[in-house]
């Protein structure tokens, strides 16, 4: 499914000018049909899946309990 720049901006919750700039910089892949740029929606789905995967990994890491250091002696 292809999105226009306006539709992609709404989908990504970004400003249209920012999405347009990213397309022109080549940071978002798009095709130009002579009148407008069309962006494949699947590239964002893959990106969002990866972000969610890494978010879960980081959350699991942060939720791990800190092990007690058995070598610590309280000798003041």
Image (cartoon, grey):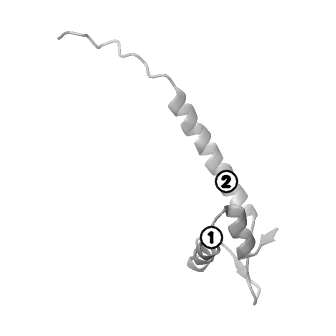
| Residue assigned mark 1 | 15
How busy is the neighbourhood of tag 2: few (under 14 within 10 Å), some, or many (20 plus)? few
CA separation in Å, label 2 and label 1: 18 Å
Quickly name the residue at label 2. 48
Dot 1: few (<14), some (14–19), or many (≥20) neighbours within 10 Å?
few
Which secondary structure, mark 1? loop
Rendering coords of residue 4 (x, y %): 75, 75
20 sits to left or right of 38: left
* Local SS, label 2: helix
From this view, report whether residue 21 is shown above or below residue 59: below
The quarter of the picture where residue 3 lies is bottom right
Q: Residue at x 74, y 84 (%)?
A: 36
Can you say whether 12 is above or below 54 in the image?
Answer: below
Height in image: 54 above or below 3? above
Q: For residue 71, say whether it is visible.
A: yes
Does label 2 or label 1 sit earlier along the sequence?
A: 1
**x, y percentage for residue 6?**
72, 74
Look at the picture and state if 9 lies above or below 61: below
Q: Residue at x 57, y 32 (%)?
A: 60
């Amino acid at each position: 499914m292809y999105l226009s720049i306006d539709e992609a901006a709404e989908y990504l919750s970004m400003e249209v000018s920012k999405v347009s700039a990213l397309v022109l910089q080549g940071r978002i892949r798009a095709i130009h049909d002579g009148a407008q740029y069309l962006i494949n929606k699947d590239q964002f789905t893959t990106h969002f899946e990866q972000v969610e995967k890494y978010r879960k990994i980081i959350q699991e890491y942060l939720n791990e309990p800190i092990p007690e250091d058995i070598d610590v002696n309280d000798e003041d």
